[in-house]
Image (spheres, rainbow, N blue to C red):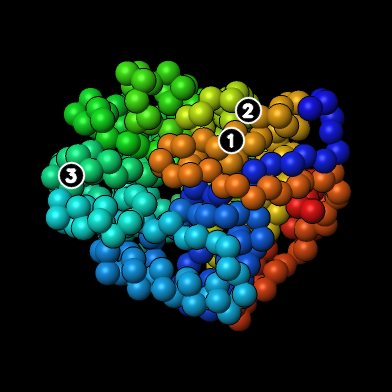
Amino acid sequence: MSNSPTKIELTQPDDWHLHIRDGEVMKDVLADTARQFARAIIMPNLKPPVTTVDLAKAYQSRIESNLKLLGVTEFTPLMTLYLTDNTSADEVRKAKDAGIAAFKLYPAGATTNSDAGVSDLKHCHAALEAMQAVGMPLLVHGEVTHADIDIFDREAVFIDTVLEPLRKKLPELKIVFEHITTKQAAHYVRDAVTGGKNTIAATITPQHLLMNRNAIFAGGIRPHNYCLPVLKREEHRVALLEAATSGNSRFFLGTDSAPHAKGAKEAACGCAGCYSTFNALGLYAEAFESVGKLDKLEGFASFFGPDFYSLPRNSKKITLAKQAQSIPMELPLGDATIVPLRAGETIAWSLV
Ligand code: DOR
Ligand code: ZN
């Protein structure tokens, strides 16, 4: 591939971290997702959260009904369960048998609908041991939530006080450090010693590859650039971009696209989350192109995720072209509207 191609063909990607919500809004979000991705890891932070296999199966069938309404036949939701202080080892084994893809750890209070999250990992030991035993991945929202920790330090403190001790205790547990935002996280995952086993990986969002924390305050408060973990300094963005484009299979695509209606974002206490799905692949292509690494996009977007989850790679191909796409100011979201990431701007790459 030349350094500045105008078209690239990729094996169809998957989104390894996605919020599609429930009810009315789900259909609009699924339409944007299924246009680009073959599969997605569906986050369980509904209200109430998806804490059991039965709840996940019911959620899955609501997703499937919406896919049917959309006429989508080639998209597979990969269901996850929300880990709580009370998750039992039995539920973990039941989840494995039922084809649940992973459990998600939200530290209590870390983000949207995380009140039922884990207060202390020591309450979950039996469940975590069972995950290790059956090969069930644990997806972590890697932030500590103590009020005395600066919001920009939450991820680094999580590595030292939660993640490293957990990996010492359960070295064979498969962990995905979700939506990493710092140099510390990128280097931790890159340098982790695993004895050749696939036990640690990380997802990276488009916004953390393309923006630093200035974007939240550019000329005034920019609620649509606010997500959790919050954008960090430029040096962190650079480290994430280096990790994503390095060809290291521990880093793969997870948009963390997290829709909130316009009114819930543009509010005195606005919700966290960027809606990046509308042209997510264009955003990733822009990031990879910025460092001349478009040739590394396919591994990140299409190969390393399924390899980590021990799922087959997709066989279908897609084409991205250097064809500017204007991003609308608003999109429909059920009865409301949503402001997509980069609304009113253009993205150089789009799906053909
Ligand atoms: O910004 C975020 N929004 N981060 C998360 O971890 C959750 C998500 C959401 O569900 O809105
Ligand atoms: Zn998320």
Q: Name the N-terminal-most of marks 1 and 2.
A: 2
In the rendered image, which residue does mark 2 sit on?
245
- Coordinates of residue 51 in the picture (x, y in percent): 27, 62
Mark 3 Cα shell of 10 Å, populated few (<14), some (14-19), many (≥20): some
The spot of residue 188 in percent (x, y) is 42, 23
Q: Amino acid at mark 3?
A: Ala
Q: Are marks 1 and 2 in contact (CB under 8 Å)?
A: yes
Mark 3 element type: helix
Which residue is at 25% across, 64% downward? 52
Quadrant of the rendered structure where residue 68 is?
A: bottom right
Of 6 and 290, which appears nearest the observer? 6
> Is the C-beta of the residue carrying label 3 under 8 Å from the nearest atom of ligand 2?
no
Kindly identify which residue carries mark 1.
Answer: 300
Give SS at disc 2. loop
Instruction: Classify the position of the N terminus by image quarter.
Output: top right
In the rendered image of this protein, does residue 251 appear above or below residue 270? above
Q: Residue 169, image x and y in percent?
A: 19, 29
Judge whether residue 27 can be spotted in this image: yes
Q: Marks 1 and 2, how far apart in space?
A: 8 Å
The amino acid sitting under disc 2 is Thr
Q: Which residue is mark 3?
A: 130
